Amino acid sequence: MSNEPLLQDAPPMVGKTLYQEIKDFPIPQMDPAVLAELEELRGCPITFTDIHNIPCTEISDEAVRQIEPLVSVDMLAYNHEKYIRQAIEGVVNQETDFPFELVIGEDCSTDKTREIIFEYQKKYPHLIRVLISEKNLTQNGSSNGIRTLLSCRGKYIAHCEGDDYWTDMKKLQKQVEFIERHSKMGLVSTNYSVYQDEIHLFKKQKLCGVKSVRTLNDMTKNPDNSRIGTLTILYPKELYRIGIIENPMFLRRFALGDTILRWDMLCRGWSLGYINEKMAVYRRHGNSATNKIGKRRFFITIDAMLIWYYFHIQGRLNIDAKIILRRVFKARLLAASWEKNAVALQKTMDFGNKYSLCSSWQVMAYKLHILSFFIRSQFKLKLFLLSIKSSFPIRYFFFTQKDV
């Protein structure tokens, strides 16, 4: 992999990529004590992405490299053979009065995803740039997400994963017009639908009372205000550039990287916009990031809370630390119980004792929370009864501090 072209070896093109804008700035280092505290809360290391050594071969045509896009659409693809066509078509069919590009980061899929992407790149050479490497970046300690984001050139960046899709062909046009009408607007999102792929059914979305312009105060008070679908967001590239060169959290690898951007811009005094129109579909299936029942699903909650905690200890987010710690504790209990990991369970209880989260009534409440989660989760009743028969993971539901 060392002989591969790197991100910095991109072909010459009009306009600077985000990487070219930040490559000469020193990357901020996190205080070792703060990093150690965050890793203790997380229960495992928080890795760092070296942006100067990300393998990247770009497949693109002169036609797209010679335009200066107002918007770059960031699309990540891995084993999305069933869905990638719909995702790409939702982007390339956008109706705008400005130029845009689609930057696809293909992370060494084992199915025909890459082949399909190349087919569309040839069909839309004036719109699509494809980033590839010889090995899967995620499995080799790097980040396809950061690579793709750093390759964007537009004034604004939008996101659409390779298994999601846009339904409103004027989505980009509406969002750009909205964000340019409002000063200090850091991000604009829209409403969206959720599609359960296995059962071919749209899930009802319950977003009530979401304001069209939200501040930091709004986001911490109303849970609905903090729900944002990554597939719907559009934001200025400049805010991500500032974040990378000033905030050491940006290049740390978390389950949901856009959460860092969101809270960073809010803490800087920018607001978030919202258009109450369904413009996209988030697809839930067995391999989608937020639908995984395993460790990653729980780490989405943990990582979101760690980001809150980081801004809290920096004095930038006024929220009770106990609220954050309790949510981290519950998510870690769920992860350890699900994996039947006694060592992780013991570490979690030690963590709970250290932060006074393990009073008898709290432990009972957490046990009930865990039990109800597994009953209400994606397990069918039959599978749940089978798990009782095999004592998995029930024996962890009813542990006591003495037991572990």
Image (tube, grey):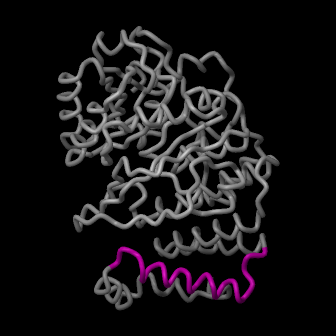
Magenta region, main secondary structure: helix
Image check: 188 left or right of 305? left
Res 217 quadrant in image? bottom right
As drawn, 298 above or below 92: below
From the top left corner, tell me how far across and down residue 165 is, in percent: 31, 45
Rendering coords of residue 90 (x, y %) = 28, 39
Occupied quadrant, residue 59: top left
The magenta stretch spans residue 255? no
Q: Is residue 165 left or right of residue 157?
A: left
The residue segment tinted magenta is 356-379
The quarter of the rendered structure image containing the N terminus is: top left
Q: Quadrant of the C terminus?
A: bottom right
- Toward which corner of the image does residue 187 lie, by quadrant? top right
- Residue pushed farthest right? 315
The spot of residue 114 in percent (x, y) is 23, 34
Q: From the viewer's perspective, is 334 left or right of 387?
A: right
User: Considering depth in this image, is 224 or 103 the residue closer to the camera?
Assistant: 224
The answer to whether residue 113 is above or below residue 212 is above
> Vertically, is 203 above or below 242?
below
Q: Nearer the viewer, residue 243 or 275?
A: 275
Q: Is residue 54 visible?
A: yes
Which residue is at the front of the view, 233 or 353?
Answer: 233
**Residue in the image at 51% along x and 23% along y:** 155
